Structure formats: C-alpha cells, structure tokens
Amino acid sequence: VNHAGRSFLIDCGEGTQMQLTRLKIKSMRINHIFISHLHGDHFYGLIGLISTMHLLGRKTDLHIYGPSMLENIIKLQLEVSLTDLVYRLYFHPTLDHTSEIIYEDERLTISSLPMVHRIPTTGFLFTEKPFPRHINMDAAETYNVPFAFFNEIKTGRDFRTEDGQLIPNNLLTIEASPPRTYACCSDTLYNEFLVELIKGCNLVYHEATFMSEMANVAKEKLHSTSAQAAMIAKLAGARKLLLGHFSARYDNLLPLLEEARAVFAESYLAEEGVSYEV
C-alpha cells in the first residue's frame, strides 16, 4: 500500500522479494510490515526480507505487526543464523478478537480487523485523516487575504480585514476531498461483524477462496466464497471490491467474478502486478 510517499507491506509470503524487484518497488522504503496470520503463504518470506535489508546495510527502523507468536519465530530465526541486525526491529503484537488502532501518523491510521480463521488472524483497515479545507483563491483575492494567513484559515479560522469586516471561514475555503479508506480482509469465514468496521469503505479486498457450490467446504476450512465476499462489500456500502486468495482448483476465475457481481456489481479480480487507486 502506497500513501503519501510511504510504502506499507501486507503479508510476506515466499517470493515477495522477487515480486518487489519485478515491480520495481524498493524494499528499503518499506518501514512497516503487517502480517495477517501465521500460515506459510502469508509470512514465509519475512525472514528473508529482514535478512536482505540487513545485508544491504539498512539504517532505518523496521516495524512489524502481527500475531504475538511471530516475535519469537523471528528471534529464533535470527538467533540460529547468528544474525545481529544492523538496524532496529520493533515488533507490535496484534489482537485477533477486536479492532484497534495499531499505527498512526499525521496523515493516516491503520486498524486491525478481526477475522475468523483456523488460527489467530487479522485484517487491516487503512483510514486517511480528514484533509484541511482548501483556500478559495478567488475569495482570498477579493478580500485581500495575505498568504501568511492561509494556514490559519485552513484550520477553520475566520479572517478580519483591515477595515474590521469579519469574513467567515466558509467563504474563504472549499471543502477538501473526503478521506479514503482501504480494508484488507485476509483469510476468513463469512463474518458480518466486519460490516460496521468497514462501513463506506472506498476499496475492500476480501478473500474469495471458493465458489458458492463449495460453501460447505468454505465453512469447514473457515474461508469465504466469492458471493459471500460480495455480500460483505454490499452490506458495508463499499464502493469497490477486490477478490483474491482463489483456490488453485480454479483455472478460470471468471465464474467467481460473475458470482460476485451478481451480488455486488463493483467486484473485480485482484490481478498480480496491477495497481489499484483507492
């Protein structure tokens, strides 16, 4: 996930480094890695990436968020390989039964999302903070507002002219674009508890391992069907849905897409190497 020049990595399976190289994404710019759960296809590439950053002489701190057991796994892997990292690695345990903010800066918050799977699993919700209002340049010129006052006005202050006239803020500013949200719902059983947590999301990624004809298998293995993923997006009032984590049994993914679109029209297949605007 790229936001305001920063890169966040969600999950790190085998082959992640090869994909980063192929897509010309600089791994050293990744400062925060989020691991949803401890099934191999979601974290077996992590120690390799950590080690590569070490060999390349990384200086910037690296933050990893994931199930509590992951911290001991990383420590053991580093210990048995006699690796003393040249950078600081901070581990932040996540909870799989509740939603909480696990990262925050001046532009963004990232919250955990509880998934229902065979082992502790979390999804992640990226939420932009509201942008300040934009200056209405025509109004600023009309009322001779000095540039030095622009930042104060953006925060909501009114402006008083030299002759004492008070110009209300809503005349001097234009509403900014609404904050965007992205939800990554990793491996999970159909879970309507998610709906309120991702309400109105711009983009939702949701696993769609099976078609509806295999709903019983999905329930047994604690996965979702494409129609169930679409229902979550529909109930949440999401704008777009990305389907992923397809079972290897499907050579043709179009039936999964058609099944989802029958429930939620703005459904799309997540394609390897393709970027999606939120």
Image: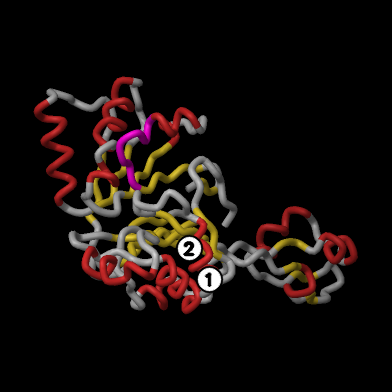
Q: Is 62 situated above or below 278?
A: above
Residue 127 visible in rendering: no
Asked if residue 12 is among those painted magenta in the image, a careful observer would answer: yes
Q: Quadrant of residue 64?
A: top left
Location of mark 1 (residue)? 238
Q: Residue at x 28, y 36 (%)?
A: 45
The quarter of the picture where the C terminus appears is bottom right
| Depth check, front residue: 124 or 207 | 207
Residue 43 image position (x, y, % from top left): 26, 43
Q: Nearer the viewer, residue 221 or 94?
A: 221
Image coords of residue 48 (percent x, y): 27, 30
Report the amino acid beneath label 1: Ala
In this view of the protein, which residue sits in the foreground, 183 or 219? 219
Q: Is residue 59 left or right of residue 19?
A: left
Q: Between residues 269 and 238, which one lies in front from this camera angle?
A: 269
Query: Could you classify mark 1 by the number of other residues whose Cα lies within 10 Å: few (under 14), some (14-19), or many (20 or more)?
Result: many
Q: Would you call the spot at circle 2 few (<14 residues within 10 Å), some (14-19), or many (20 or more)?
A: many
Earlier-in-chain disc, 2 versus 1: 2
Question: Which stretch did the figure color magenta?
Answer: 11-17
Label 1: state its secondary structure: loop
In the displayed structure, would residue 15 be above or below residue 206? above
* Side (left or right) of 216 relative to 9: left
Image x and y of residue 81, in percent: 13, 24
Task: Read off the residue under disc 2.
Answer: 204
Disc 2 residue type (three-letter): Val
Is-magenta flag for residue 57? Answer: no
Spatial CA span between label 2 and label 1: 7 Å
Above or below, comparing residue 61 to residue 103 in the picture = above
Measured from the top left, where is residue 239 in percent x and y? 57, 68
Residue 176 appears in the picture as rendered: yes
- Which residue appears at 51% of the width and 33% of the height? 23
Residue occupying image coordinates x 47% and y 54%: 253
